[in-house]
Image: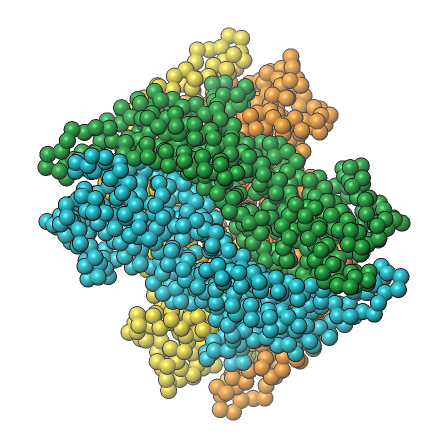
Chain colours: A yellow, B orange, C green, D cyan
Amino acid sequence: MDSLFWPGAERAGDLMTPAALVRAMVEVERAWLEALVAAGVAPADAGGQLGAFEIEDARGLVAKVASGSEAGGNPVIPLVRLLRQQFSGQPAAKWLHRGLTSQDVLDSALLGCLGRVLAQVRAELDGQIAAVARLADRHRATPMAGRTLTQHAVPTTFGMKAAQWLTALLDARDGLDRLPPLPVQFGGAAGNLSAVVELARLAGSPDPAATAVTILRTAAQTLDLQFRTPWHTARAPITAVGDALVGCCDAWGRIARDVIELGRPEIGELAEPVAEGRGGSSTMSQKRNPVLSVLIRRTALSAPQLAATLHLAAAEAVDERPDGSWHAEWPALQSLSRGAVVAAAQAGELLAGLEVSPSRMAENLQAAGEGIQAEQRSMAQLFPSPNQPETYLGLTDFVVDDVLNRARETRERR
Amino acid sequence: MDSLFWPGAERAGDLMTPAALVRAMVEVERAWLEALVAAGVAPADAGGQLGAFEIEDARGLVAKVASGSEAGGNPVIPLVRLLRQQFSGQPAAKWLHRGLTSQDVLDSALLGCLGRVLAQVRAELDGQIAAVARLADRHRATPMAGRTLTQHAVPTTFGMKAAQWLTALLDARDGLDRLPPLPVQFGGAAGNLSAVVELARLAGSPDPAATAVTILRTAAQTLDLQFRTPWHTARAPITAVGDALVGCCDAWGRIARDVIELGRPEIGELAEPVAEGRGGSSTMSQKRNPVLSVLIRRTALSAPQLAATLHLAAAEAVDERPDGSWHAEWPALQSLSRGAVVAAAQAGELLAGLEVSPSRMAENLQAAGEGIQAEQRSMAQLFPSPNQPETYLGLTDFVVDDVLNRARETRERR
Amino acid sequence: MDSLFWPGAERAGDLMTPAALVRAMVEVERAWLEALVAAGVAPADAGGQLGAFEIEDARGLVAKVASGSEAGGNPVIPLVRLLRQQFSGQPAAKWLHRGLTSQDVLDSALLGCLGRVLAQVRAELDGQIAAVARLADRHRATPMAGRTLTQHAVPTTFGMKAAQWLTALLDARDGLDRLPPLPVQFGGAAGNLSAVVELARLAGSPDPAATAVTILRTAAQTLDLQFRTPWHTARAPITAVGDALVGCCDAWGRIARDVIELGRPEIGELAEPVAEGRGGSSTMSQKRNPVLSVLIRRTALSAPQLAATLHLAAAEAVDERPDGSWHAEWPALQSLSRGAVVAAAQAGELLAGLEVSPSRMAENLQAAGEGIQAEQRSMAQLFPSPNQPETYLGLTDFVVDDVLNRARETRERR
Amino acid sequence: MDSLFWPGAERAGDLMTPAALVRAMVEVERAWLEALVAAGVAPADAGGQLGAFEIEDARGLVAKVASGSEAGGNPVIPLVRLLRQQFSGQPAAKWLHRGLTSQDVLDSALLGCLGRVLAQVRAELDGQIAAVARLADRHRATPMAGRTLTQHAVPTTFGMKAAQWLTALLDARDGLDRLPPLPVQFGGAAGNLSAVVELARLAGSPDPAATAVTILRTAAQTLDLQFRTPWHTARAPITAVGDALVGCCDAWGRIARDVIELGRPEIGELAEPVAEGRGGSSTMSQKRNPVLSVLIRRTALSAPQLAATLHLAAAEAVDERPDGSWHAEWPALQSLSRGAVVAAAQAGELLAGLEVSPSRMAENLQAAGEGIQAEQRSMAQLFPSPNQPETYLGLTDFVVDDVLNRARETRERR
């Protein structure tokens, strides 16, 4: 995903790039090798080497790993070969990757990368929640026309609308919070970890199984991933992350669509923050396009289908490790997670500087005329001698307060 | 979704059928009207009528509601009209639906229906978890060839494989458990509940907002749905259910694919339970097709795209109530939820009676020859004077126990 | 797909209903049996019976076929059994379905049903093309603001916009026209037609293969489907229909979105045709919702994911007949094709009665102010002494004429 | 799409890369500018400069264009700015891009790139068709077990299976051939080409519309794209390409699934071509994974959802140019088209060197036993005194010949 085909992609920085993935794979190999050493399964002099390696050589490594990925079907095989060449003659070359399978390294590395993606999305969401909470509070009494199926319905306030946006953002945040801890993947060739137990046995461990479990736990802790028994073909840890990220994109897309529609010149109630050079046209000098919202909407229209691919991959897993569906996860995860980070940043910028026009809201509400009071009148007709009509904003304050409370609780829970 | 285009659909019974939806909509209208009465907003004689109505006339109502749905774009409008005709001249006709909007009734009714869907899926999953836990325990020492990317890898056991299936089922169960409580939808025309507050005011309530909140809470309680401020355009309650159901279909699909592949006659390690007349062919008398697995896989291939439609609908929500994306949710929800219930029942039957052939597993493992021991040999080569090779099943027992423990905890948590 | 979950579904009438599918399956069985008789492979008294049967018993048959579909995984198996019971003791019972496999009957029946769907969609499109051609011609000089990324860009005309709609409709029509003829499916158990050749041989045919080919051609002709060698696992005939139908939904969705946006009260340039009771609200008497467009958009948001399921099914076909992906096609085809027919009818009604407001268009253009002339001014600045500005409508007439010509050619090609 | 997340991506070379897109955009700008000059609208000294520019500076340009893409929402705006800076003070700077809008440049450039993609896919398909035609012919009498729903059905031949593969490939090829010519996009700011007509008028053209049409035709011809009136919001040219590419992926996926299943060691009838280092495992030295098929299947599982995104984008187009859906097309098109090219090359290599084992086929057929003759026996029972059974391969020869004829006609049509 590059900025030419996905404008704004640079906002995702190094998250889920080839270089980040290679670095994460080296981290997995290192954590495992050090755990083998710590458990006395690999000799002491096999440890301590991969750290230095990574710093010096990561960049050249990425291209070599990439070009070698097809032969074995995944990037772990060339990475291990290249690392062994690098340490040729040293114990690390011999002991590297022992007990692991490609999928262990790639799954664990991807989850490491996804952990960083989720942290960034969470941070962005928190900023957005604060910004929209301010909007909801400030505009709780800013009247505007409520619109349903695009037509004027009854009066409402912009604070009420912001409370609805906030609900969407809080739901997205809750979706991330409900995610189970990201697990490590350590299963060995066919998921029963036979190789590492064998290594422990051959190394003289009195209880090879216990030694192997210790190695797993140690490496998981180093990688800051949850210890879990293997899930080579039980892919919920992947689909859950995908679903949660799509949930975020849904919330941003929903907000963007309001900004897009209410920013139409005939409506003019909302506008994107002005930034030097943003929203211009290649031929019309007066144009100020809602570029952030448009790019957010692009992501929201694309993300659900990528998550669907992750689910299909999960459903098609077979045997002890799958025959193609695992491979379908990687590009979908990359596009989805980088896309979500970009949209998160764009939504954050949009919401932090959103321009709200109470005067246009008032004008449009005024122009809506009598029709927009029709429901209120019809309520009065239910009573023989109704009171004089007052404002018709219902539970707006209650709803705004309720959602602001929820935002406060979410913030305090962190 | 009917049984001709979706064989097995009858297993979903009345869940999410037109009749069930109409009944649920009447329940919502009734709960709301009774709450209006209880709060003193509607007169006492407006209550107590819809219950009898439903029992007598639900069937004729469904067809009329259906044929009247297009004019207003949803089935609530004709339902309200028909109910008012039915109670013509009585207070219920006048007070019915006051304070609500179509989306309140339909969303709340759909969530009521989805609650029943989820309960059934949960029950089925619990049965499956118990069945697969038995398989994992019984076959923890049943050797078979581990296969990765379809090729023989290292030896494993069928118990180990069952533990992987169990992991998938437990993840699916956890996905359901992580769902937030299903909320009621009560927002009124544009989500700020102006009409119900106005009714309370006109009825002389000293604190109309508080009265309105009481009405909301009362009706939510009657419907056994969580009280929540409106979410007309914040659709996470819908997408979350969709994602959780797809997660279940993923788990069943993953298991079905193993049954399909390992049931190939050349492999013959698993077979579907025999049932009179099942799996036959229209022309080949010897055929015993893995029909349950095939139909489960059908669902697993279909479900992710339906959930993607729900997410697109969420992302496209706009204004105070959306311009088409809300309407796209209904058929996707119906197909997805009925499909999931059918697959749940099929998977339950499949797993309860699955035929496992330890002898074919042993034969295939034997036939795999030396290759399948290659990894074990290569481990030995790392050591100058390795011990004699033993079994190479690694942490199988640990993994099986770990997953069985998780199954036990899941059961106890209920 | 029923009208409660899919308002407007009744517009699809009997197309792709369970009853229609059963009828089509009986037609396939009959055409095949008559062809066996005509070729002298089955005895003469085996013919001439299914026609009468269908007329008398189709209704009761549907429910029985539906409830029997799961056991064999498809509705053909119970249908054949029921037909044989019905003709018990008669030659038809013995000779029915001989040489066929379930997939032959179901695929051929589905394509028969799809042929009727396509015919109706084509007819609707032709009416829409005529209606929009009139709009384009009538309004070729009706000025309005051109809008890009929702903002005022340069002046245009409504005729120019209608020409763009017409382009979308003509492309959709071309997509249907480019479809290859719908083929019959006759392959027998594993696609090599061994049973029918065997029957011809046993019946004494001197050239059993030639006799079998004659039977195939005869039956195909009866069914008005193209003769084709088997395509049990080469599913392009299915995916092509799906793609073409989605292409139609795209065109209608694109038009609906303009009607939705330009019908916002603040813009007010377009409105849906008025119909008694349409577009009303359950609580707001003034509402006139753009219901047709909203329901069209619902379909357009749903259809692409259904077509994706058809492609996944095609990609997953395996062996001589597939292990679940075939079964995934049926509900997707049903929802997609019925949905398309409904949207076709709704779009036809929308376009036939669309209300265009040249005065609101002129007002909005006027209100757009100087900005909308910015491009024109910047063109003048390229020249040292530019002429006076004139209208700035560019090739509008040329484009409208070009598209009208294309519409005329499309009409004449039929 | 890079080789780390999409192993094999390097097979797509420069197709649809950022550099290729920038180059294509410069080609569009150049073709247009030269056409302006040729028509006498721009001065002669504005021409002849962009060609040299591209050769010297394309590489540095790509990064600058990429990083500037977000501000205006697309890469054309920074490209034009950079080109104008480059030619500062020269006539080209002043005249560049006059009369165009961003979408003109990007759509035309993308179609130029897609043209090269389609050419490569066509060439690969032709090679595959030839290879599979040879397989079908050579193995028309190689007996094997026919399998349906994974179970033994009736005998067939590998030539018959290859004929089914060939059908899928020919259908995919026909899908490409049915594509309408790729059109150029020239519409100007809002699709009515007002700016170029204005330029012609200001430049003194006696018939500015005719001059503008000439410019369009000239530039279209230079770019080797079909002249077409604007289609800014009528996106069938994009969705049609997407559907055709998915159709190809379906065919390759279908073949790959047979190779994957029949290459299971217990079946062993097919194997991928051996290549040094391919199909190895990171831990099991004996492994020979079907890597090509696995990677093809990955693409086939991913492609349909990308095409669905293209359709959603088409359905959501609005106004004179869309508000986000256009932007969603680019990454989907890139992933889909590069993915298709990679899969094409992998399928070509797979089919050119596929290993077929007639002996394993014969063994499995033999092992299938009497059951696989059940249908043949049941046919005999229809006759009082049947002939002796012969081979039961039905119309295999006829079908193979028919499909080979179709392949020949396809070849000759080129």
Is residue C116 in sight in this rendering?
Answer: yes
Q: What residue lies at 50% left-to-right and 18% top-to-bottom?
A: C285
> Is D294 drawn above or below residue B314 in the view shown?
below
Residue A358's image quarter? top left
Q: Quadrant of residue C390?
A: top left
- C43 or A107: which is nearer to us? C43
Residue C76: percent from the left, percent from the top? Answer: 73, 50
Q: Residue furthest front?
A: C206
Image coordinates for residue D129, horizontal then vertical, percent: 52, 65
Outermost residue toward the top? A385
Side of D64 relative to D252 (left or right): left
For the residue pair C144 and D312, the one nearer the viewer reads as C144
Q: Quadrant of the N terminus of chain B?
A: top right
Question: Is B411 left, or right, of A225 in this rendering?
Answer: right
Q: Residue at x 63, y 28 (%)?
A: B67
**Residue A191 horizontal/vertical position (percent):** 55, 70
Q: Which of the two residues, B346 or D299, is positioned nearer the viewer here?
A: D299
The residue lying toward the viewer, choosing from B61 and D113, is D113
Residue A403 lies in quadrant: top left
Query: Residue drawn 75% across and 51% down?
Result: C35
Does C186 sit above or below residue B335? below
Residue extending farthest to the bottom is: B385
Query: Where residue C88 sits: x, y (%)?
Result: 87, 48
Question: Residue at 54% of width from left, 53% of height from top?
Answer: C311
Q: From this viewpoint, is residue A397 visible?
A: no
Question: How many marks do you count on the picture?
Answer: 0
